[in-house]
Image (cartoon, rainbow, N blue to C red):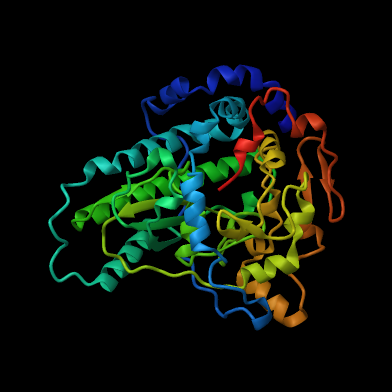
């Protein structure tokens, strides 16, 4: 019924969901009606490493020369600026998840955009007697105090910044910030309430990042927080900072919550110690699991990785994925059915060591989902029949080939 209601109200929501009217929502007087996300429990590192048969490479296999050539031949572009016609088609479909949290989210985005204004003139040199390790430790302690689940530091890389934002970085470091998304709501995917929880998580993350950027500025450094819609490819930085590995579903899988978290970044000139990529065994688990490959309603996830722009990855079929994500409550079944997301890496590794099996694979607990379009439950081995108008909606008039993800 919720899916039908959303569908019926899309025409009037095309009038509501425009940039000008959304800004009016942001500027309404009074407090935010949606409270901030509760501080999640602190994350801890995995208790043990992967067994030898699951080991691959730290982070992800990549070819630096090929990445540089790809950047020179085809720089990355901001999706929202490149496809305004697709954004206009997409926006009304998100009214159920967006409008309840819109004021808090939009105010947080405005505060993020203003962090750059609070930078003082760059000092001739950094404060004397600075201990890089201590500064890095203090930064991570401040992030934890603010309620950010995890932060990692990676070298800023212009190859992973969208061309529209080139040169805006505040320094040569990227602090990638992660906030865990509520567990219970995520297990209901695909569901508009989960999308609302995701946007609420983004709002809380941005609010906390404003505090972290301000802390860096108080220490005498430049800091510029970026919006969650992205000026940079944060999955790249999450991998480089050792916060997780790239899953077959194209998402950053953290050991603590899989992809059930939201990412954004802060560039800074603070001389923080770089973190490094790690092999958690996640790629090895993905190769043996492949539940997301089998459960994707439109078969948009390939089972094998290949090199693309210098990165070895499972390149998603965005032409099939994007229309479904937009029209079916955000879809994200690939997130829901990931055992690392549902159980955490420690539990998945413990089951693998004990039985050689992937925890939850083949069970309805992990693989089953309710499909909003027809209201049916689909257990393991069954997938909904997808109407052609869902995959290729007539109103979506743009070249899908331009949707190729970075």
- Residue at x 87% of width, y 50% of height: 382
- Coordinates of residue 153 in the picture (x, y in percent): 38, 63
- Residue at x 65% of width, y 52% of height: 315
Left or right: 370, with 169 as reference point = right
Q: Nearer the viewer, residue 45 or 241?
A: 241
- Coordinates of residue 238 in the picture (x, y in percent): 48, 60
- Residue at x 33% of width, y 45% of height: 167
- Coordinates of residue 114 in the picture (x, y in percent): 30, 39
Left or right: 102, with 272 as reference point = right
- Coordinates of residue 321 in the picture (x, y in percent): 69, 42
Q: Nearer the viewer, residue 21 or 119?
A: 119
Q: Does residue 179 appear in this view?
A: no
Q: Is residue 371 above or below residue 273?
A: above
Q: Is residue 28 above or below residue 405?
A: above
Left or right: 402, with 293 as reference point = left
Left or right: 268, with 360 as reference point = left
Q: Does residue 323 appear in this view?
A: yes
Q: Nearer the viewer, residue 178 or 300?
A: 300
* Among the 4 quarters of the image, the one containing residue 3: top right
Look at the image and tell me in which quarter the N terminus lies: top right
Q: Is residue 391 above or below residue 234?
A: above
- Residue at x 71% of width, y 25% of height: 7
Total numbered badges shown on the rendered structure: 0
Q: Is residue 9 above or below residue 58?
A: above
């Amino acid at each position: 019924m919720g899916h039908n209601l959303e569908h019926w109200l899309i025409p009037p929501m095309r009038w509501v969901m425009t940039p000008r009217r959304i800004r009016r929502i942001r500027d309404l007087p009074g407090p935010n009606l949606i409270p901030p996300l509760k501080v999640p429990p602190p994350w801890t590192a995995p208790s043990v490493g992967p067994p030898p048969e699951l080991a691959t490479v730290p982070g992800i296999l990549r070819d630096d020369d090929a990445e540089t050539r790809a950047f020179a031949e085809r720089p990355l572009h901001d999706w929202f600026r490149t496809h305004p016609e697709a954004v206009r088609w997409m926006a009304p479909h998100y009214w159920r998840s967006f409008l309840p949290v819109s004021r808090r989210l939009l105010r947080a985005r405005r505060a993020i955009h203003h962090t750059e204004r609070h930078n003082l003139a760059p000092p001739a040199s950094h404060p004397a007697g600075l201990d890089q390790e201590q500064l890095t430790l203090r930064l991570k302690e401040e992030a934890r105090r603010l309620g950010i689940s995890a932060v990692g530091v990676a070298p800023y890389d212009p190859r992973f910044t969208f061309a529209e934002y080139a040169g805006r970085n505040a320094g040569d470091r990227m602090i990638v910030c992660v906030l865990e998304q509520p567990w219970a709501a995520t297990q209901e995917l695909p569901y508009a309430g989960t999308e609302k929880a995701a946007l609420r998580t983004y709002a809380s993350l941005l609010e906390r990042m404003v505090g972290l950027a301000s802390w860096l500025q108080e220490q005498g450094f430049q800091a510029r927080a970026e919006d969650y819609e992205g000026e940079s490819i944060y999955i790249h930085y999450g991998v480089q900072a050792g916060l997780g590995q790239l899953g077959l579903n194209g998402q950053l899988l953290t050991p603590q919550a899989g992809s059930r978290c939201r990412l954004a970044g802060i560039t800074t000139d603070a001389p923080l110690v770089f973190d490094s990529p790690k092999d958690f065994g996640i790629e090895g688990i993905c190769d043996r699991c492949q539940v997301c490959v089998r459960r994707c309603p439109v078969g948009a996830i390939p089972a094998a990785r290949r090199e693309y722009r210098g990165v070895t990855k499972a390149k998603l079929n965005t032409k099939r994925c994007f229309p479904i994500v937009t029209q079916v409550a955000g879809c994200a079944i690939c997130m829901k059915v990931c055992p690392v997301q549902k159980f955490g890496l420690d539990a998945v590794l413990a089951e693998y060591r004990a039985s050689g099996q992937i925890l939850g694979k083949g069970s309805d607990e992990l693989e089953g989902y309710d499909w909003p379009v027809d209201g049916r439950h689909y257990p393991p081995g069954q997938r909904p029949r997808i109407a052609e108008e869902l995959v290729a909606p007539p109103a979506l008039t743009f070249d899908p080939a331009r949707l190729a993800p970075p």
